[in-house]
Structures are given as structure tokens and as C-alpha cells.
Amino acid sequence: MAIKFEKKGDGVYMLDCMGYVCPHPQIYTKKALEKIQDGEILEVVFDNPSSSESIAAMCDNSGIEIVEKNNENGKIIYKIKKG
Amino acid sequence: MNEVAIGKQRWALGIVGFFALISVTTYAYNEYYIYLSAYLWFGFIYGMCLQYGRFCFASAFRDLFAVGVPRMVVGIMISVILFALVSAFVTATGISTFHSSPASIHSVIAGLIFGIGMVFAGGCASGSLYKTGEGNGSALLVILSISITQSSFVDVGGWANKFVPASWHESAMAKGLPDRINVGDGWVDQYLAGYVWDQPISTFAEILGFTNETFAGAYIGNVLIGVVLPALLLLSVVYVLWSKKGYIKELKKQGKTYSIADSLAGFWRMVVSSKRTAIAGLILGVACGLQMFVIEGLRIKFGIRNAGEILQRVGSDFGLSARGTVFDPGYWYVTTQEAQWVGWVLQKLGWENTDNIFFGYINGIPNPALNPADWMSLALIGGAAVMALLSNEFKFKKPTKELAVWAITGGFLMGIGSRLGLGCNVGGFFVRVANGDPAGWLFGIGMIGGAFIGVKFFNWWTERQMAKEMAAFDL
């Protein structure tokens, strides 16, 4: 198992960090956000609860909006809009 | 509420019921067990707080250096200030269970090794316990690695004696330890008795000429000078370097410009930016202070100074140290009891490990089922599990090969660091800082340096992985 980065549609990317523990999800999220363009969406999928707080704080600190948060029985999905 | 969530709530209730049953039945059997139950329930509270606030010391400087998030540094500083205020009261009344540790460069080196380890492992010693309560298999591997490393490291002699300076050996031999302790054979033994024990022990209160057990000593020396001022200085640096930029950006969006007067508002915004972490820090701090109060109260009630006497009274004197004691800190601690349970298992398997200072002279290796600190750690895992189950965040996760390597390597480094520093992020840093012990800040400085080095390595590794994954995209 490794992280997965996929294009889901026009301007929408998915970063799958399922199974990974701290600090992998937050570091990969930061790196993916650095690569995509302003206005594009990054959907981060992870199951490490501790990372949720760090990813939210990282976005808040950088003025990036998390447009949707979901938790499906421990599978956490954040949709983050860059810019 | 769906069926899965209801099922998880039942499990949470079951865990609480299990611990309650242990407390009630053991108390009914013998009232001395209430001493162990006190440890148990404080551990349970710590577990709930840690999980609720995602309170992991590893993330404090790691997330700051790696992703620019200051929430955990803030949480820890809130917690340490609250803990200091409560424990200062306990100290001023003369019933503190805390003892300062020798302070020298060894604390910084130990913190550095520990800091690298906690970044690699993905969690500190206490963080790995609460994450195990979330069902995280990697965190469990970290605990196993810390435990095995420590219990082996403290007993390594033979070839390792070649790396002991002659001055340490001479000093250790001159300490007059009991014959049962083979102090001349063992790297850690000679490090402890020949070097660490010769280092100065003090508190900020004593450095300033106060006595710890006075209001001025406890509150001015240890809390104000030893905790509040350094914590505020640290938070100010974190605000200027990591948080101020985001606040200015936010003000710009609102059409405002940043002035000096906004500094205070920006600083406060940073403090309350993660309410969960701040609330957890607050409760943890108060609970840590209260535990010292409760344990010392029970010692007075039973007329004892150490849990070793309790074990003797309940008829279990196996694994007592040469002084008749067992590890009984009277406050939150993590790593020593982890070394003890593996030490106990190894002893049962035939490894003679009671001739070293760590097990044989200081901490003992009692049966884990009767070890107060083990009760605390197990309940910490249980408390975290309850919290995770209630918030639908519990999930069994098997570690992958990659994560297993990180966990074992990180746990190994944390095990070495915690034995060199006589404690981990909790016993070596958090508790010491809150009680005005300069050795705590020295360990903390090392941890920050270690986190920085760990993050540098981690960034290199993740960059490689990300480059592979993104090679197909024109980004």
C-alpha cells in the first residue's frame, strides 16, 4: 500500500492516505496543495483522526478553505479548495 | 444513529464497565488496591483528553516545522501552565511527589534522540498509547519497540562496557551500591551512577534562592520564572514565525491593515485556534496536578512512601528493587512501566536483569498485573478507546511494511532517548517543566532539535514518494 494521487475530473484531484498515520496525511496534503492550482479542489481521504485537526489548522493558517468534511465510519474525507 | 455507531457505544460502555469492575472487585478484596485504582482512573482521564484533543507531543514541533501548524505547541504550553499552577499548590503544601532530575547536556542529547524518534514513529510515547486506543496497529508497534529497546538497553553490558569512560566507571564503583547490583557491568549502570548522578539537581525556585515548599518558591520561582515566562516567550516566537502571517492575510481579506495593537488579538487567535486541543490541555494540566495530590494523600492514609510496601502488604513481593521499592512516580509517566513489563517477561523467560540499577535498584520489575504505573497506561489506552468509539473514530488498522519500519525505528530511538534522559516527553519534559525542574527544558530543547532533524528527513522521504505518484501529471 502506498499513497495514491489521482485526477478525478477537471480541476479535482484525490489524495488517498488511507492506512497512513501521522504525519503522513498532513505532509502529503501540504505537498499536494503546493502542486495544484488556485481554485482547484483536493479531496483528501484518510483514516487517521489525529491528522484531521492538523490538516484543518494548516488550511486555516494558510487561508485555504475546507469546503466539505465527512466521516464515514472512520474514513475521513476533506474537500479542500486552494486559493 | 446507525447500527455501527450504536455498536461502538456499547463497546465504550463495556470498557468503562470493565475498569469499574476491576476497581470495585479489587477494593472489595483488599482496600490497598484503591492505590492502583487511583492510577487507573487518572490514566483513563489522560487517555480521554489525549484522544479528544489529538494531544500528541510529537506533533507539536513536527507539525510546526513540517506544515506550519502551531496548535499543539499552544496546547502543550496551556497544559503545562495549568499543571504548574496546580502542582505548585501541592508543592507549597509540602506534599509533592515530584523529585527534580540531574540536569546537564545529557538531557539535551537524550531529547534530541527522542525527538527524532517521535517524528519517525508518528507519535510520542503518550501519543502512541492513545493512538493504540484508536485501534492503530502502528502505534502498538511503537509501544512494543520502545518497551523492548528500553528493557534491553538498561541491561546491556559486556562489549558495551568498552564504551564507558574510565571516570564513569570509577565514579560508579565508588557509589557503594548493594552487592546485588553489578554496577561495573552495564553501560547504562555506569552512565547513571558514574555520570548522571554526579550532575546538579535543582529547581528554578532553588536557583533563585527560594525553598520549594513555600508560596514564593513554588509560585514565583517554579511557576512564574520556570514555566510561565519561558512558555510565553516560546509562544511569542511561534506566533511571530508561524502564525502572524496567516492573521495578516485574514485581516487583509477584511480590508484591514495589521498594526502593533493587533498583535495581542493575533496571539489570542493562535491560542484559541484549536479549541479541542486547548480544552484537552486545560483538563490534562489540572488532572496531572490533582494526581500528585491524590497519590500523596493515599500514601499518607496508608502510611507508606512507595507502592512496594503496598505490594508486600497484599502478599506480592516479587520484583521489588534492592530498596524494597517499585516504580511509583505519583504522577503521569509512560516509558518506565513500558520497560518494566517487558523486563518482567524477559525475567520470566530466564534473562537475569535484576542486577542492573534501572530494574534492580530503582524501579523493580513487579508483576504487570500489580504495577500501578501499568494500570495507568492500560487505562490510558482504554480511555482513548472510549473517546474514539464515542466519536466514531475507532478503527483497527494493521500497519503496512513501510509504517512498521517507521514505527520500529522511531520506537527504538525513543526507547534509547527516554533511558538516557530518565523519561520521555511526559516524565522527561512535561512533568519536569511543570514542576520547575530545569532538566525538563533541556530535554525539551533537545526534542525540538530532534523534531527539526526528523522533519528534514521525513520531507526528503515524502518528496520522493510524492514525485513518483505525481510523475504522470503535469503539475
Image: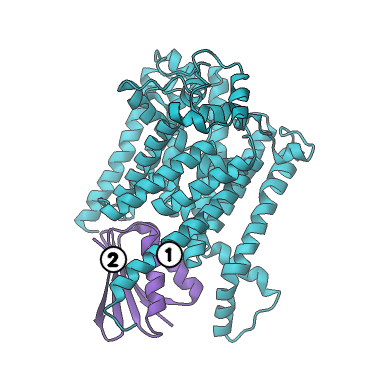
Name which quarter of the figure residue B263 lies in. bottom right
Under circle 1, the secondary element is: helix
Q: Which chain is cyan?
A: B
| Res A3 label | 2
Q: Residue at x 38, y 43 (%)?
A: B383
The amino acid at mark 1 is Asn
Label 1: few (<14), some (14–19) or many (≥20) C-alpha neighbours in 10 Å: some
From the viewer's side, name the closer residue of B394 and A59: A59
A27 or B172: which is nearer to us?
Answer: B172
Task: Residue under label 1, please give it.
Answer: B459
Residue at 50% from the left image edge and 16% from the top image edge: B322
Residue at 44%, 40% in the rendered image: B415
Residue B187, percent across and down? Answer: 50, 30
Hue of chain A?
A: purple
Chain letter of the residue carrying label 2? A
Left or right, residue B3 beside residue B356: left
